[in-house]
Image: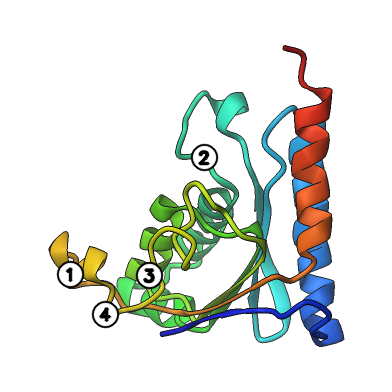
Amino acid sequence: METDNAAPGERFSPEVLGFMQLAIDQAKLALDSLEVPVGCVIVEDGNVIAAGRNRTNEMRNATRHAEMEALDVLLVQWQRSGFSAAEVAEKFSMCSFYVTCEPCIMCAAALSIIGVKEVYYGCANDKFGGCGSILSLNSSSSEACISSGNSGSKGFKSCGGIMASEAISLLRYLLWTRKP
């Protein structure tokens, strides 16, 4: 799969911008809870089916990133609906993720393994990015996936730069308001 980074001024569809705005709203909720302001929404067939925000501080668990929170919401829903493992895999293959910041290596690897359709993100993650900034775990042929023995990696389409300035503003606000 590939990563597309939006050129400055590139226009996205109103639908993509609308879903990213919902992810930004989740990031604002994270900021209000003194978390790193990252939000995520999961979309299937043009409908938001789950949302999540960073909760690492609140849960005292470093794995509680926005993507993982949204994934857990879906898994609980689908388990209650009685979906089989094959049905869950099929449903994930139809899901699009909208995240305010490029998924980290952990989240990108998880999204690749479960086989999501695509990920749209706001700003790049220059320290931990898993969709091209540091590693390209969205690519099913990624050397990192192969060398780690991860033959279950499916890869996904990735597109960044959507409402990046808004996502960066939230991250900067967090830095400005933290006490030394």
Report which residue position mark 1 lands on.
146
**Whole-number angstrom distance, CA of label 3 to CA of label 4:** 11 Å
Residue beneath the point at 46% across and 75% down = 116
**Whole-number angstrom distance, CA of label 1 to CA of label 4:** 7 Å
Which label's residue is closer to the chain start, 3 or 1?
3
Say which element carries label 4: loop
Say which element carries label 1: helix
Say which element carries label 2: loop
The relative height of residue 69 versus residue 123 in the rendered view (above or below) is: above
Amino acid on which the number 3 mark rests in the picture: Ser
Report which residue position mark 3 lands on.
112
Report which residue position mark 2 lands on.
64
The reply to whether dot 1 and dot 4 touch (C-beta < 8 Å) is yes
**Whole-number angstrom distance, CA of label 4 to CA of label 2:** 27 Å
How would you rate the neighbour count of disc 3 (Cα within 10 Å): few for under 14, some for 14-19, many for 20 or more? many
Amino acid on which the number 1 mark rests in the picture: Ile
Residue beneath the point at 65% across and 62% down = 50
Which label's residue is closer to the chain start, 2 or 1?
2
The image quarter in which residue 36 lies: top right
How would you rate the neighbour count of disc 1 (Cα within 10 Å): few for under 14, some for 14-19, many for 20 or more? few
Amino acid on which the number 2 mark rests in the picture: Arg
